Image (spheres, coloured by chain):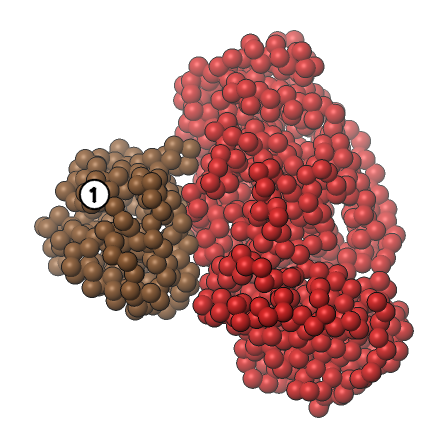
Chain colours: A red, B brown
Amino acid sequence: MTIAAEKNPPVKLPNEPTITPQVVAEHGLAPDEYERLLKIMGRTPTMVELGIFSAMWSEHCSYKSSKVWLKKLPTKAPWVIQGPGENAGVIDIGDGQAAVFKMESHNHPSYIEPYQGAATGVGGIMRDVFTMGARPVANLNALRFGDPSHPKTRHLVSGVVAGIGGYGNCMGIPTVGGETNFHAAYNGNILVNAMTVGIAPTDKIFYAAAAGLGNPMVYVGSKTGRDGIHGATMSSTEFNEDSESKRPTVQVGDPFVEKLLLEACLELMATDAIIAIQDMGAAGLTSSSFEMAAKGGLGLEMALDKVPMREEGMNPYELMLSESQERMLIVLKPGREELARKIFEKWELDFAVVGHLTDTERMVLSWHGDIVANIPIPPLVTEAPMYERPWKLTELPATLDAAKVPAPKDWNASLIALMSCPDLASKAWIWHQYDHLILGNTAVRPQDGDAAVVRIAGGHKGLAMTSDCTPRYVQAHPETGGRQAVAEAWRNITATGARPLAVTDNMNFGNPQKPEIMGQFAGAVMGIAEACKALDFPVVSGNVSLYNETEGRPILPTPTIGAVGVIADIGKTVGSRLTKAGLRIVLVGETKGWLGQSLYLREACKREEGAPPPVDLAAERRNGDFVRAQIDARRVAACHDLSDGGLLVGLAEMCIAGGTGMEVAQPAGNGVPSHAFFYGEDQGRYLIATGVADEIVAEARKAGVPAVVIGHSGGTSLVVKDLVSLKLDDIKAAHEGWLPAYMNATE
Amino acid sequence: MKAAVLVFPGSNREGDVAQAIELVTGQRPQMVWHGDGDFDKTDLIVVPGGFSYGDYLRCGAMAAQSPVMAEVKRRAAKGVPVLGICNGFQIVTEAGLLPGTLMRNSHLKFVCADVHLKVETSQSLFTNRYQAGQVIKVPVAHAEGNYFADADTLKKLEDRGQIAFRYCAPDGTVDGTGNPNGSIKNIAGVFNETKTVMGLMPHPENATEPLFGGTDGKALFEGIVEALT
């Protein structure tokens, strides 16, 4: 097919401003990008056309700074049905079922308006998943806030958590996991990364590629309003200069409508009416219609006056750029319009045929009969700007000698201080505001295991899911940090007994035009790619959020890894709660006592330095495969991976989660200084509570996996020979007390 | 036993309760759309949890005015048992089938957690498989579960044995520690005068399997089946 010549150039609308360099700049297009536009168009664009180019070539939609790097990620495996490039990734989980999942950021809006920003982030990612034909079964979210003492932090935590709960709870999808960190680097830019996992039949996955000349394009869901238009930058160039145009750029969510949209879409998907479907997320009607036509190699004509509108006086520019929520664009088979209309009317949603597919490879938009935009589709995609920005890798810092880090003067106090520090303190205050039990399939709840485990309805199979990143490691050395984020996600899935299958990556970074930031991105991608290859853990979806900076101060580089695994018999899954006395505690993996970038170093010694713990991917895989096999053989009562805070924190977490104490000791002749042994953050390690420790240790020896018995369970205290003796109630009070006390404080 | 589960726009725990009923009866209940005022005759009507009509206006207020609820009221008047859970409790209360009202949680936040309930009476078709005074563990998940009734109503409820469940500590102590939402007198569930209508905020349907939150809620459904078959 070739692009048809432009037959009908667009008309100028009343009050349409002249395109000046200033108007172009306000649309975020660089002068050379505007030159490209002129070459593609062969004439000066209309405002609508300029707006469309501006949205499609934005960093958010075009990935222009990150694309060259993202190509390096491994995306294939025999179980991958759909990798990056669609609304969400799709993997085969057996029995004719697929898991559909993705993580996406909503950072900037959540800082401006935490409730709505976070809520619409959750709404958007759920739409991405059900657009593909999957019913969402679980949500997770990874949150990073500024220093607790920063004046905005409490307000942001409160609003973000309420927004996530408000949307997810109403949708009736359990929010089962996630993570929350605090660091001053996020004072001006919080991160809200939301992940949804859904289940679909493998033979009923829906895609965005349009097909079939003349087929109708249908708009369904909510009406289009003026929310989410690039209001701030566009206020001086609106077609009509009225106050309405100055509304904030943050979208407003309505989870009730999205619940109706979910049910209506799934009902329509059960028929044979749909050819292609795409949700309207960032850049709304522009990107959804463009992607459908471009992927199908077709053109389209749309009558924008047919779009359901929330208020009077809206114009084509606003309609194309609005980011109103809870909307979908569908290409139907011919003659199925009435069937579809009845379903959406039953759910009391808007339904309008707004256009049809053509063979011109042009996007032709009309407004009450007049053409207002006429853009050739392929070059807008193929000629889109793509940058290989200068990058400078972060050098690996020198290894910190554990002997140069002071041991705690008071071990009891040091453990209490770590267990109640903002990063390690219980996040129960947060997840109790999320309905994590609805649908009745949650087997491993928040804080009860390293990953959440959810039953797939109607069977015995379970899905394990987690989200992970240790930003301070990534900051110190992005390649190691990238490797570690993937390894920890893989380890967390493994610790429940599930087999890790695939990941989604949510890359949050600062300004990519700075070589050191681009270097962080490049380094993190290299590390992620290496770990994903070594662990057979392909990336199937993802999202990039750049420019997370305020007044030149960037966030910690945060490549959040969301991961999914499967366990064939959910009855075999284990959590990390230690609930029985008389079990022995086995430490799996090698402990060298790595204190560089550890939480002990940061919290107890107030130092953030050294190289982060190295990740030996071969050992990681060997140790993890061993642990998973032990769980599968039902030799394991509880399992916990070791990460932030190291061994002693891991032991304390197991004890307080299950209400059972422990007595442990550092193995004789171990040689590692005690504070490094108990607080070091060496990777690739697990704690196992078991009634058959001897068998496990013998099996480990055969497999070449380091494993040593360090103690046994029982009592109501955590006792470490010669070092620690604490009542579980006291650890628990400190661990669970910090966040509620912080949130309830008025100062 | 034949059961019907109502479905409003925004209902979201209808599947959970249908699953619990199927678990004890072996039969999938009939799902009844809110606009359908003329559904099959059943032995039990369940009004499930969720956010009917988005909980806009006031939780349960709009659903209470729907065609299906007009029919539920007619059948309830004839003695057909009605069970309202969470949003369903709010709806049947708004519909006037139960006394009192459900306000926003005293701490103003949504709460999802396991709670302990003290069974106040075994003398009802809903609670006959429990012992009076027994403590059970089931989850709650709501933002508006703070039960309130005026002093006269409360006295009548107490005198007539219309209180079904109270929030309590794990050892059965009824005090502030076990109360997740500020409900007056720790009330978690109530009956109508004839004990043919029961509403409760907690979710017994999410406590029917050992791996998924325990089985303390299962006896409620087993008791209903026993009473109605």
Q: In this view, does A301 lie to the left or right of A518?
A: left
Residue A531: x and y in percent read 74, 35
Location of mark 1 (residue)? B229
Going 13% across and 55% down the picture, which residue do you hit?
B193
Q: In this view, does A28 lie above or below B211?
A: below
Quadrant position of residue A421: top right
Residue A238: x and y in percent read 69, 82
Around disc 1, counting alpha carbons within 10 Å, would you say few (fewer than 14), some (14 to 19), or many (20 or more)?
few
Q: Can residue A41 be seen in this view?
A: yes
Q: Is mark 1 on a helix, strand or loop?
A: loop
Quadrant position of residue A12: bottom right
Going 33% across and 65% down the picture, which residue do you hit?
B36
Going 53% across and 50% down the picture, which residue do you hit?
A136
Choose between B31 and A507: the one closer to the eye.
B31
Residue B51: x and y in percent read 40, 59
State the quadrant of the N terminus of chain A.
bottom right
Residue A516: x and y in percent read 82, 49
Q: What residue type is labelled 1?
A: Thr
Q: Is residue A707 above or below residue A376?
A: above
Q: In this view, does A607 lie above or below B88?
A: above
Q: Is residue A688 above or below residue B114?
A: above
